[in-house]
Structure formats: structure tokens, C-alpha cells
């Protein structure tokens, strides 16, 4: 009986060795899988970060585009009447010249009164659109608002003060449409 027991023990030891070997193979395979999984995880994480970065950049570009478009639309609305106002300025100048004429005839005076009414109506429309006249009386020369056509030496005026307005200037809201042409004291 002793021999049978020994054989059983030997078989058991062989089996144990086989099981141990197979366990080591399983462990080795699991370690390799873990290494592959870790590398795959790191690769996927890097790809995810790159895609997230791209997404954020595209989102920022879209936001900038949207803001720029909104500002352009606001500017277009703000200065929508600039083209027509620019074309009406010479008409306004001609009305002013026509109204400066001195007449003695009663019939001509009534025509001038009609012109004055049309002129005031035109000025009101321009003001409603945000057009304002650039101030030149007793003002000092500002190259952003005025265009110096002549320099003179006049007593009673300070240096760089406007002496005379040769042509009125106008602004549309905060934008100069036509600078005022002026004579400036030296």
C-alpha cells in the first residue's frame, strides 16, 4: 500500500507542477494583457485629450466668428444711413447758400420761406438719423474733426483757434462723415 500512496503523491506533485506552470502562464498572459491594456489606455487618453483640445479650439473660433459677425451687423445698422447722408450733404450746402441770398421782392421772399421750411425739414430728418454739425465757433483746431485749408494771423484769436468756417463738417453719430473746412489762426 505504501507504493500506491507514493504513486498518488507523485501524481499529485506532477499535477501540482502542471497546475503551477499553467498558473504562471495565465499570470504571464494576464500581465501582458495588463501591459497592453495600459498602453491602449494611455493611447486612448492621449487621443481623447487631443480631440478635446481641437473641440475647444473650434468652439473658440466659432465664438469669435459669432462675436465679429454681431459687431459687423451692429456697425452696419449704426451707420446704415451713411451713404444717403453723404449724398445729401451737398444738397444741404446748396440750401444754405440759397437761403443767404438777400431779396427785396415780396414774391421772392415767399419762395425763400418755402425753401426755409424744406431746409428745416431736411435738417430734422438728418438729425433724426444721428447727423450733427461739427462745432467750429470759438473752437480750437482738432485734426480729427477739422480740415485746415488756410492759416492766417488774426488779432483777437488764440493760436490754433478757428477763425472762419469755409464749409460745415458733419458727424454721423460718432463717425466724421465730412470734416469742417476751416481757417486757423497761427
Image (cartoon, rainbow, N blue to C red):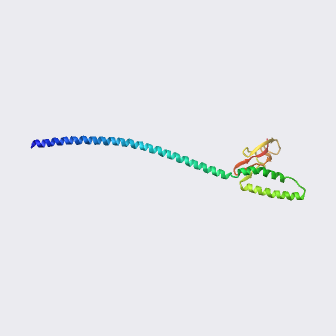
Residue in the foreground of this view, choosing between 155 and 70 = 70
Residue 36, quarter of picture = top left
Q: Position of residue 70 (x, y in %)?
A: 61, 51
Q: Look at 79% across and 45% down and name the residue there.
A: 182
Residue 105 is left or right of residue 52, and the answer is right
| Residue 134 visible here | no
Q: Look at 47% across and 43% down and name the residue there.
A: 50
Quarter the N terminus occupies: top left
Quarter the C terminus occupies: top right
In this rendering, is residue 133 above or below 43?
Answer: below
In this rendering, is residue 24 above or below 103?
Answer: above
Query: In the displayed image of the protein, which residue is found farthest to the left?
Result: 1
Residue 148 is left or right of residue 74, and the answer is right
Q: Position of residue 122 (x, y in %)?
A: 77, 56
| Residue 42 visible here | yes
Q: Position of residue 143 (x, y in %)?
A: 73, 43
Count the labels in the image: 0
Q: Position of residue 86 (x, y in %)?
A: 74, 49
Q: Look at 42% across and 44% down and name the residue there.
A: 44
Residue 44 is left or right of residue 169, and the answer is left
Q: Look at 81% across and 51% down and name the residue there.
A: 94
Amino acid at each position: 500500500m505504501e507504493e500506491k500512496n507514493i504513486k498518488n503523491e507523485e501524481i499529485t506533485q506532477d499535477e501540482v507542477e502542471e497546475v503551477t506552470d499553467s498558473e504562471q502562464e495565465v499570470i504571464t498572459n494576464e500581465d501582458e494583457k495588463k501591459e497592453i491594456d495600459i498602453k491602449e489606455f494611455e493611447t486612448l487618453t492621449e487621443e481623447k485629450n487631443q480631440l478635446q483640445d481641437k473641440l475647444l479650439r473650434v468652439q473658440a473660433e466659432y465664438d469669435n466668428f459669432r462675436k465679429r459677425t454681431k459687431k459687423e451687423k451692429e456697425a452696419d445698422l449704426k451707420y446704415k444711413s451713411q451713404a444717403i447722408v453723404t449724398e445729401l450733404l451737398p444738397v444741404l450746402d446748396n440750401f444754405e447758400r440759397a437761403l443767404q441770398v438777400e431779396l427785396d421782392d415780396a414774391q421772392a421772399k415767399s419762395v425763400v420761406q418755402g425753401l426755409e421750411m424744406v431746409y428745416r425739414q431736411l435738417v430734422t430728418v438728418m438729425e433724426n438719423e444721428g447727423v450733427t454739425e461739427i462745432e467750429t465757433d470759438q473752437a480750437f483746431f482738432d485734426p480729427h474733426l477739422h480740415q485746415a485749408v488756410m492759416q492766417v494771423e488774426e488779432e483777437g484769436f488764440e493760436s490754433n483757434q478757428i477763425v472762419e468756417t469755409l464749409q460745415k463738417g458733419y458727424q454721423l453719430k460718432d463717425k466724421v462723415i465730412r470734416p469742417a473746412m476751416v481757417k486757423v489762426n497761427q
